[in-house]
Amino acid sequence: MRRLLIAISLLLIPAAAFAFDTSRGRENRVGILLPADFDGDRYVHDSVRKYLHGELRNAGFVPVNMRDTIDELRERGDGDAMYYVEITAGESSAEHYAGIGVAGRHGGVDLGVVASKMWVELNIYDGETLELIETYDLAERSSTIAPTGVSLGGPRAWGWVSLPWAQWAQSRRAAKAVARDVAQRIASID
């Protein structure tokens, strides 16, 4: 029994060693770079970077968050990805355009049209040469009807509280749409 266990162990060790695939280097890796000089809303950069990770993975790429800028990569000259993405600018806005209040005897709810806009400028670089392939200006818009406030009270006193989560949700939805657009554009590069 002991010999059989040793023989199986000796067969499993080489099989496990061959399971490591070292040839998967750069063919489907996409590095998400830090911006050299970001101009805009930091929330936009962070949220698009976060959602870009998932969208690239869904498109069949292996996303890698880099701690380098494109200038630092060029100085070292050691790009190990197929493409690099740099988010260079971005702005967002979430606004409440219209609404209606529905009240009862002791409280009420405000419903409103919440719209979010997000604009992002980004660069895509070739992984081998670190040369700029394309610069994109992407804009997405998202809107919905959602509760925007709650009120409580009676005949002598009342209070009202705003619910900003609807605006946050629309900003996240716009960031996901921008990230999806970026992933599709990277996948369509020849």
Image: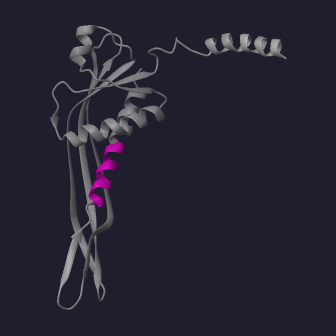
**On the rendered structure, is 106 left or right of 2?**
left
Q: Position of residue 101 (x, y in %)?
A: 26, 78
**Res 138 → quadrant:** top left
Q: Position of residue 143 (x, y in %)?
A: 31, 57
In the image, 101 versus 8, the foreground residue is 8
**Res 73 → quadrant:** top left
Residue at screen point 26% across, 53% down = 116
Report the residue that reaches farthest toward the bottom: 155
Report the residue that reaches farthest toward the right: 1
Q: Position of residue 85 (x, y in %)?
A: 31, 26
Bounds of the magenta span?
A: 165-177
Q: If the image is split into quadrants, where does the N terminus sit?
A: top right
Residue at screen point 34% across, 50% down = 173
Q: Is residue 166 magenta?
A: yes
Q: If the image is split into quadrants, where does the C terminus sit?
A: top left
The chosen color scheme is one colour
Determine the main secondary structure of the stretch shown in magenta: helix
Residue at screen point 31% across, 10% down = 129
**Res 158 → quadrant:** bottom left
**On the rendered structure, is 167 left or right of 189?**
left
Relative to 21, residue 53 above or below: below
Relative to 17, residue 117 above or below: below
Q: How many marks?
A: 0
Relative to 178, residue 68 above or below: above
In the image, 133 versus 32, the foreground residue is 32
Residue at screen point 23% across, 88% down = 154
Q: Is residue 163 magenta?
A: no
